[in-house]
Amino acid sequence: MKKIIKNGRIVTDSQVFKGDILIENGIIAAIGDTLSDPDAEIIDASEKYVLPGAVDVHTHMDLQAGKYRAVDDFYTGTVAAACGGTTSIVDHMAFGPKGCSLWHQVEEYHRLADGNAVVDYGFHGVIQHVTPSVLKEMEEISDNEGITSFKIYMTYDFMLKDDEIYQVLKKAKEAGIVIAVHCENDGVLNYLRKTYVEQGLTQPKYHPLSRPARCEAEAINRMLHLAAIAGGAPLYIVHLSSKEGLLEVQKAKASHQKHFAVETCTQYLTLTDSLYQDDQEGLKAIMSPPLRKEEDTQALWQALKDDVIDVVATDHCPFLFAGDKQAGAKNFTACPNGAPGVEERLRVLFSEGVMKGRITLPQMVKYLCTNPCRMYGLYPQKGTLLPGSDADIVILDPTKSRVLTHTDMHGACDYTCYEGWKVKGDIELVMLRGNVIVKDNHFLGEKGCGNYLKRQKSILV
């Protein structure tokens, strides 16, 4: 059925204007001033913002992390995403068995997501060791599966060493593949973690001290240089958390290094390490990198205002506070790292960013919608409102407000880090390919209505 969204304030990454949107067969058919069609259902969006569906390119649904598994699977996690105005995700695969091929996790993630996701979805591959066959599989998977990005880690059990990173970057440059990187100095942070535990300093407040901002900054600096040595390999730095790390990004931009992008996450803009002072509640916010200080949040907001950072994602990776998180009650190093966030992102960024004058509304659309799609090969199918684009649409009422609370959330986690936050603006309606899947915070879609996204090349290549 045709639909016309009438009289809305349409928002793109460059402008806000009043207009109508005609939707036909799940696609935006036209945008104009006074559109009409006798066969169309009319949706009145007067005095409301009409946004592209948000795209979260950093989630961890159904993640197996050691002996712990994220509590959101691809059904509950994407229901939460949809209710928060996110209509597409690109999920980061977990590590597979030691020595496995890259195809192993591709097949596993299709098994987990296909028929379960309620928003459209893609995957980032993951590289946990480097051999000639792995490098060959990178290109095969990119060509055949549309998985045009792979993640590597500079810490954790399957971290890559510099020579391995260099080989991956060389192949990425050759094949037009983006390499996403978790940047932390493994040697220093593991020494610090071990030292704190040996000294009996095991409360959550020692978590950020064990992973200092300069561990992030050093690794970002090293990664940027390695990408440059590899001929300008396409690089995407995930979850930037600190002003020290930001300084390394600014240095690279000042030196005119190209082919790289930078992501931060909602929590690093809005939450601080003061949460770790509570020995119990602090477990909820144990994630890596850790939350930083107020001066870091201010630096990151300024970087968004100045267009230095490209994307705001979530790193959504929830574990039950009443269950798995309690493993860290007596030792923070035993606590699984991660927190929920996929449902809160758009509301928090609109309230804390746009409504407080830190960023403009088009900038919000750029960081939540358009840029993620440009960086990861989904534009202009996703992330924008243009004729021919998928009709993934969010209608947001700026006159309303909502108090964020776990009881109103739709994921499987038993807490939100934003409990009790009053946010300005509320999501009235969410469409996926022209179908209304959320209305007034109620999920109306069907399990498995999300489509797998074969992605194109990034603008970074």
Image (cartoon, rainbow, N blue to C red):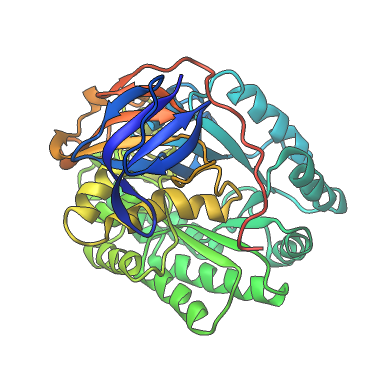
- Relative vertical location of residue 285 with respect to residue 108 in this rendering, above or below: below
Quadrant hosting residue 328:
top left
Q: In what quadrant of the picture does the C terminus appear?
A: bottom right
Image spot of residue 49 (x, y percent):
26, 42
The one nearer the camera, 187 or 407, is 407
Image spot of residue 298 (x, y percent):
25, 66
Q: Residue at x 38, y 68 (%)?
A: 307
Residue 115 shows in this picture: yes
The one nearer the camera, 14 or 388, is 388
Quadrant hosting residue 34:
top left
**Outermost bottom residue:** 255
- Relative vertical location of residue 415 with respect to residue 223 in this rendering, above or below: above
Q: Is residue 336 left or right of residue 451?
A: left
Image spot of residue 355 (x, y percent):
17, 53
Quadrant hosting residue 285:
top left
Q: Residue at x 59, y 74 (%)?
A: 258
The one nearer the camera, 18 or 286, is 18
Q: Residue at x 38, y 72 (%)?
A: 244
Q: Is residue 257 left or right of residue 6?
A: right
Q: Is residue 443 left or right of residue 420?
A: right
Image spot of residue 187 (x, y percent):
55, 63
Q: Is residue 125 left or right of residue 120?
A: right
Residue 66 shows in this picture: no
Q: Residue at x 59, y 59 (%)?
A: 154
- Relative vertical location of residue 217 with respect to residue 406 in this rendering, above or below: below
How many numbered callouts?
Answer: 0
